[in-house]
Image (tube, rainbow, N blue to C red):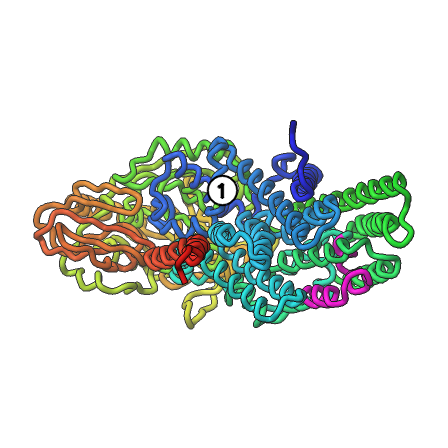
Amino acid sequence: MLRPAGPRQAAALLAAAITVTALCAASTVARSFPFGPRTRSINDLGNQYLPFHAHLWDLLHGKADGGLLVNWQSGFGASFLPDFGTYLSSPFALLVAVFPRDEIDLAVYVITLLKTACAGAVMASLLLTLRPGRWWAAGLLGASYALCGWSVADAAYNPMWLDGLIALPLLCLVGEWTLHGRRRIPGVLVVALAWVANFYTAYMATLAACLVLVLRLVLTDLPLRRKFAVAGRAGVSFGLGVGLAAPLVTVVYFGTTHASPGRFTHFAPVSGEDLTARLLPATYSFGSPALFVGTTALLLALALPFHRAVPRRVRAGWTLLVVAVTVSMQWEPTHLAWHAFTTPQGSSYREAFVVCALLVIAAWQALSYGPPDRRALSAAAALLVLLAAVGSRSGLVRPFVWPVLAVAAPAAVTGLFLLGRTAGPRPAGGGRRTALVGCAAALLITVQFGEATATTAVAARLRLVSMDDYAPWGARQQRQSEAVSEADGWPRYRTDPGREQTVGNDPLMVGGQGAQYYSSHTSDVLSGTLTALGGGWTSGGRSLQSLDNAVTDVIFSVGARVHSPPDPHQNWFAQDGSGVTVSRQDVPPLVTVRPHDLAGAAVRAGGYGASPYRNQELLLGDRVYTVPRLTVRTGEGRTAAREEGRRPGRRLGALPTRSAGAPAPKPTITAHCPAGSEVYLWAPHFAGTARLSGASAHSPTGRFRSDPVTKIAAMQRLGTVAASGGVVVELSPNRPSHIPDGAVGCLDAARLRTVAARLRTTGATDVSVSDNTVRARLPVGSKGIAVLAAPRIAGWRCATGDASAVPAGNFHGLVAVPLDGSSTSLTCTFRPPGLRLGAVVGAASLLGLSLLAGFPALRRRLGRQRGLPGRQ
C-alpha cells in the first residue's frame, strides 16, 4: 500500500499542480505556444536562451563544434564556460537531452513549467517549516509565490532566473536548518547548488534569506550568545556553499569584466501609482516591479498588522521587513546592492521576486495563527480598496484589470471569512466546520487559479505586442540547418549560416561557425574588431551580426556561406520565398603566416583607423579596395548637409510620405571606381535601403537597420561597377540618417583572390581543433607571425615547437604568435580567466566541508576516549 503523504508533501504537490495547470491554461487563453499559434519566443528567449539550450543539446549528444571551454560556432570562437554558467548550469537544463533537437522550443517550455512548479513546491514546504498550519493553505500560498507577477511577466522568458525563484525558499530552509542546528552538510550543498544554477538571482536570494534569518533570530527568545552562534554557523554554511560554486562563479565574473560594455541605463524609480498598480492582477509593463502575488495572499499580508492572534513582535517584524525591502527597490544605493552594484540592462526590477516571497511569508504568518478576524479582514479589505484607488491612476491599469479584480477580491474576502467561521471562540460544528473549510479552500484556490491565469495570459499577449518575437523551429531553420550540414568543412574552413539571420544566435540554432554571437559575455575585443571591419550589431554591441564580405571571409577562413531570404516572421523587409543557397570560395586555413615586417603590429591591440576598408586591408596584409571621393545629394538634388565631430559625414532626412502614386525623390551617393569592381556601402548609422542605380533586378538591395543608441548597420555589397566606372547609389532612408565619409569601397576581386592564394600557400598545412586547443603544422622555415583567425580574448596561450606556452600576442584583435623560422608546429590552448582561482577556492571550500563533516565524529571519538577507565 502507498504511504499517505505528509502535510509538507501534500502542500508541495498542491502548489505544483495549481502552478502547472494555471500556466497551461494561460497559454491556452493567450493562444500561445504550445497551445496556440502565437510564438512565446520573445526578445532574449528567442535570441539567446533557446539557441544556447540548442547548443547544450548538441554538446550532450556530441554534435557541437567545441566543448565546455570554447564555443567554436559563435563569434569566430568564444569562451563558453561563462555562457554555460549564466544560461545553462541549472540541473533542469539537462532535460533538453530527452527531447528531439527540432522540439527545442517545447523542451524549454517544459523546463519553465517544471522550474516554476518546483518553486511553488519548495515555498509550500518552507511555510510549513516556519510554522505549522493547514497544508492546503500552504500549497495555495506556495502557488501564489510561484505564479507571482515577476515569475509570469519577467522570468517566463528568462528561464534561468526561475532558478532564483527556487533558490530563495531553499536558502530560507537552509537558514531554518541552521537555526535549529540540523543538516549542516546538506545546507552547504543546497547553497552551492543554488549558486551554480544561476549565481545572479542566487545572489539576490541569498541576501533575502539572510534578512529572513536575521528577523527570525530577532523574534526568537534565544540568548544573545546563541543568536550570534547561529549567525556564525549560517555564515560558514553560506560561505562554504558559495566557495564550492566558485569554479563557475569566478569564470562568470571575469567573463563580465572582459565583455562589451553594452548600453547602460540610469536607474529611475517608478511612481507610487505604478508601484501600487503592479500589486493588482492582470497588470503588465516591462520597466516596473511585478509584485502581484494574488488577492488572497495580498489580503492576508495586509491583514497581518491588525491580526490580534499574531504576537505583536511578529506582526511588526514581518510588516517592517516587507515595507523596507519594497522601499529598497526604489532607492538607488540599495537598488544597486540588490543587483550586485551593476545597473541591469533591460528590466530594472529583477529583485522583485524577493518582495513577492516576503509578501507570501507575511501572509502565512497571518494565516498560520488562525484566520484573520472580522476586524483584521475589514482593515485589509479597506487597504486593498485604497491600493486599487491609488493604482487606478496609473496607465498600467487597463480596463480588463477591473473585471478580474471585481471577481477576485470579493471571492477572496468571502473565502477568508468562511475560513474564519471555523475558528474563534464559537467554531462551527464538526460536519459544518468541514464543509466550511472545504468551501473556503475551493473558493480561494479557484480565485488564485483564475487571477493567475488571467495575469499570465495578459503578460504573454502584451509582451508579444511590445517586444521583438521570433518563430519557433520550423521549415526555415530546418532548411538552413540542412544547407549548413551539407557545406560544413570545419576545421578546414568555416561555414557561416548567413547574413539574413533568423535569431541573434543562428550558428547555435542551425549550425556552422560564424561571426554571429549574442550574449552578456560577448567580448569587447570581438565587438571592437568586427565593428572596425564594418560589422553591424544590436543590443548596444552585445549582439553581433554576420558580415557578408569577401575580404573578411578570407581573413576568417569562411569557405562556405549560406544565403537565405529574409525571415517572413519578421516585419522588417519580410518577403516571400524559401530558397536557401550556398556560395563557396577558396580561403586560407585558420592559421596563416604573415610577413616579418608586420611583427610590430602583433604585440599591440587595435591600430585601426576610421575606414573599415583600410582596416580590412590591415588584417589582410594587402591593398584590395578603392575608396573614392563621394558626393551625397538629397532627393531635391542639393548637397546633403555636412556634419563634423566624432562622425564626419552627411546628414539625410527620412523620405517624405507620398500619397498617390508619385514616388518620393531619393537621395544619392555618386562616386567613380574601377570598372568591374564590387561596390560595398558602409553606413552604420543609416536606416533604410540602398541600391545601385541602373542595376539589374538580380542585384542585391542593401538593407540597413540602425538607431541612435542600440543598433548599427553592417557593411553591404550592392553590386558591380559598370564599364563607365560611374557609381550611383540610390538611398531610401526611413528615418534621419548619417552617411559617413568614405562610405563606398570598391573591391578588386581578382586582387583578393591573388592575396588569398598567397595566404593559402604560406599558411598552415594542417590544422586540428578540439574543445580548447588548436594545433597547426607550419611550412618549414616560416617566419613572421602565425595568426589564428579567432578573437584574441583573454585566456589564450600559445607555444611553437617544444617551447613553453606564453600568453598569445594580439594582431589587431586576433590571436598571434611570433615565429623565428625554426619551428614547424604551433599549439594554442584556451583557459577561461578565473578558472584557476575558482578551482583553488573550490578546493579550499571542499576541504572545509570535509572538516565540517568530520568534526562531529572526531568530537564523539574524543569524548569516548576521555570516558575510558584510567583516563583523566
Residue 165 visible in the current orientation:
yes
Q: Main secondary structure of the magenta part?
A: helix
Residue at 21% x, 61% y: name it.
602
Residues 43 and 235: in front is 235
Residue topped by disc 1:
93
- Kindly identify the residue that appears in the image at 28 percent across and 45 percent down: 557
> In the displayed structure, would residue 469 be above or below residue 195?
above
The quadrant of the image that shows the C terminus is bottom left
Q: Position of residue 290 (x, y in %)?
A: 66, 56
Residue at coordinates 45% horizontally, 54% vertically from top-left?
A: 860
Over which residues does the magenta segment extend?
A: 297-323
> Quick one: SS at disc 1?
helix
Residue type at tag 1? Ala
Residue 762, given in percent of the width and then of the height, sits at 15, 47
Q: Assign the N terminus to one quadrant of the image.
A: top right
- As displayed, is residue 627 above or below residue 754? below
Percent of width and height locating residue 270:
66, 66
Q: Nearer the viewer, residue 260 or 495?
A: 260
Foreground residue, 450 or 481?
Answer: 450
Whether residue 403 can be seen here: no
Q: In percent of the image, x 49 and y 46: which residue is there?
A: 90
